[in-house]
Image (cartoon, rainbow, N blue to C red):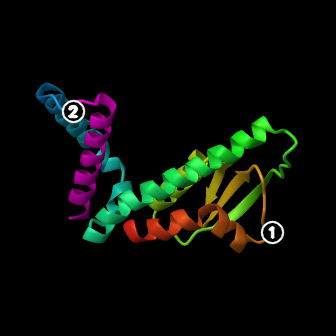
Amino acid sequence: MKKVKGFLLLWLFLMAAWLLGTGTFRMDELITGLVLSFGVTVAFAPFSSLYRGIIITPKSIILIPVYLAVFLWEMIKSNIDVARRVISPSLPINPGIVQIKTKLKTPLAKLILANSITLTPGTLTMDVEKDSLFIHWIDVKTETIQETTEKVSGKFERILKEIIQ
């Protein structure tokens, strides 16, 4: 059953990517997207258990747009911060590599967390080892792993643990 769920989720994800990429709902484009995404799913689903950790519940369906909104807001705030640092070179920076601990268990959840951190300007996920992520941070503001974890990934992780297990 988990393999079927993983297969269907991968197919839906690829179809959604197709729709976003083409930006059209014309029948010929939809059929092409369905066929191509199905073919890619058939070819690659046996090699990936990544999508099997997604839990589809009414709560998770609501939390996905919430996660995207939180991510977008954090990205906007980080973009403004980095832009201010570029425009005003006199603003202090304190770059460094920090370690954060995650309570997320599945590879997919860690992948989404690492990518969310990397896509937020001013931070870059360098490595993931078990429950630790190593992040290059443009302005290190904390000294303990707990504080750093909360500052860098807390908002993302709270929502992700409800969506993916």
Where on the picture, by quarter, is residue 82?
top right
Amino acid under label 2? Gly
Quadrant of the drawing holding the N terminus: bottom left
Q: Is residue 28 above or below residue 10?
A: above
Where residue 100 sits: x, y (%)?
67, 65
Q: Residue at x 32, y 36 (%)?
A: 20
Where residue 140 sits: x, y (%)?
78, 58
Q: Is residue 158 left or right of residue 138?
A: left
Camera sees residue 160 = yes
Q: Nearer the viewer, residue 140 or 131?
A: 140
Q: Can you tell which mark lies on residue 33?
A: 2
Q: Residues within 10 Å of mark 2 (few under 14, many from 20)?
A: some
Quadrant of the drawing holding the C terminus: bottom left
Q: Residue at x 54, y 72 (%)?
A: 103
Q: Residues within 10 Å of mark 1 (few under 14, many from 20)?
A: few
Secondary structure mostly seen in magenta is: helix
Q: Residue at x 34, y 56 (%)?
A: 51
Q: Nearer the viewer, residue 97 or 19?
A: 19
* Callout 2: SS: helix
- Magenta segment boundaries in residue numbering: 1-24
Where residue 157 sits: x, y (%)?
52, 66
Q: Can you tell which mark lies on residue 143?
A: 1
